[in-house]
Amino acid sequence: MYGNTFMTAEEAKQMDQTQDNPQKLIAFEARIERGEKIEPGDWMPVDYRKQLIRMIEQHAHSEIVGALPEGTWITRSPGFKRKLALIAKVQDEIGHGQLLYSACETLGKTREEMLDDLLSGKSKYSNVFNYPAKTWADMAVIGFLVDGAAIVNQVINSKGSYGPYCRALERICFEESFHLKQGHDNFVFLATGTNVQREMVQEALNRWYIPLLHFFGPSDKTSVHSEKLMKWKIKLATNDDMRNQFLDQYVPKIREVGLTLPDEKLKKNLETNKWEFSDPDWDEFYRVVNGDGPCNKERLEVRRFAEEQGRWVRQALVNPQDKYVTPFA
Amino acid sequence: MKNLILKMADDALIIGHRNSEWTGIGPLLEEDIAFSSMSQDKIGHAWALYRILNEELGGEDPDKAAFNRSVKDFTCCHLVEYPIGEFDFSLVRHFLMDKAEFHRYDLLLQSSFLPLVNLAKKVKGEIKYHVMHADTWMQQLANGNEESKARIQSALNLVYPIAFSLFEKQDDEQAVIEQKVFVGEDVLKSIWVDDIANRIKEFGLTIPSSIDSSAHLGGRKGYHTDHLEPLLKEMTEVFAIDPNAEW
């Protein structure tokens, strides 16, 4: 599961200052224009590599941090069917992390370096995982809607220009489609269940509404555009376009089972074909991105605990004769 | 015979629950995935065993049997109840338990009770991989560095006596043996002891010399460690919100 990449003004400015070999750059951009995939050994602009590492790494972190809120409900899942589905689902997410770390390694950064940067706060993960999964109904909302949102983003990104990332995303999207079914089944089951169940899922939906709007990143009006990211097919759709596509697909499905979304202004403008909604407090979004969300600290502490507790195991596997080899696929 | 199947189901459910706790916090991502995968298998075995009780022997619906029973009615052994601890503890438990599970299902291929034979055929194929996983890791960590070797040896010293709780007999065992449903815990135990001794020697580790397992018995009769009750409370937390609802 993953949201959307966006950059600060400072980062965008830095990016525009890098100088690449002009002839190589022209040839590179022509390849992308023709729809070719860029592969690990190919020449690529410095910023292309840098931005891809940043994005794939964030995506990988999002998978393994995203496993934590759902992971806490594995032991509490009611019944064999739900329990087995949830363990398999969370296991898939960790598998996606593994796949993405490998894709990112082809660009020259090791998994260990990436995990270190996650723990130091140098690299981020999707903001949505800084919110708590308070009740069992959160499993339905996350499985259906957060995964649904992630699929919107990932399907688009799988059409990008970097071969290893696209191939990883194709497999991830295939698995995510089962997660969506799992989440949808649970969501509809609770929404059409007893009063207690219905209230639970409505309450969870109310809490997740804002984080879901935040999921695709700041509005196009305020976020920093990078022509380069679009031209190089690292970013393929704007934040607002993806958000709109998500609302198009999912609001009717939520309303269909008689649940509501906590925003009176939420409606589709039939003239512009765009969804309109109340301002989802972008200050909060930036606050949480910068570390001050309800679960930022806890998520990183759990990861740090896992890293530290498992260090002796990893060290025992090290053979001094082994050399690190960058994967090539 | 019901008791035999129930304790097997309870063992599989509780160890599956414990191992699922590694999902997200393993020492490396590959181990999160491995423990998660094995826990799915174990919970699947438990489900299949409760289904046999339900469909063949008049027992409760599997979800009721697993998620709506008091701690006293559980007959799992103490080995499966302990928290996951660190990776050394979980690995050694997994090694000792899956060897026993492998041989148990192997012996059940000869059972006079057909549903168990059919299940054993399927399960043995899965547990073969659990055993391979445990063996590979035991071999690597017992021969890794000084720290890993010391950790694995001391986990073995701790867990080995507890593992004998797997073979605690139940009151109706004689009938189970006479009806040729299962050859009995003593037979299984002696196969297991020999197999473990050989493997441990290959790993360059030593079996603790004097074993007193008496403190670890009682699980089969409903006397459990203090760890089981909180585990069950957690496991049934959602059901308890609305006990009459389907989830």
Image (cartoon, rainbow, N blue to C red):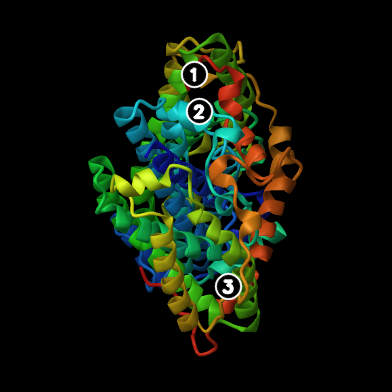
Parent chain of label 2: A
In the image, residue B59 above or below residue B40: above
Please tell me which residue lies in front, A235 or B24: B24
Q: CA distance from mark 2 to mark 1?
A: 8 Å
Q: CA distance from mark 1 to mark 3?
A: 42 Å
Q: CA distance from mark 2 to mark 3?
A: 35 Å
Q: Residues within 10 Å of mark 2 (few under 14, many from 20)?
A: many
Image quadrant assignment for residue B158: bottom right
**Which residue appears at 63% of the width and 73% of the height?**
B210
Label 2 amino acid? Ala
Please tell me which residue lies in front, A158 or A190: A190
Percent x, y for residue B178? 31, 47
**Which residue appears at 46% of the width and 19% of the height?**
B246
Disc 1, SS: helix
| Residues tagged 1 and 3 counted as in contact (Cβ below 8 A) | no
**Which residue appears at 58% of the width and 26% of the height?**
B238
Marker disc for residue A140: 2
- Which tag, 1 or 3, sits closer to the chain's start? 1
Parent chain of label 1: A
Return the residue at label 3. Answer: A314
| Residues tagged 2 and 1 counted as in contact (Cβ below 8 A) | yes
Return the residue at label 1. Answer: A190
Label 3 amino acid? Arg
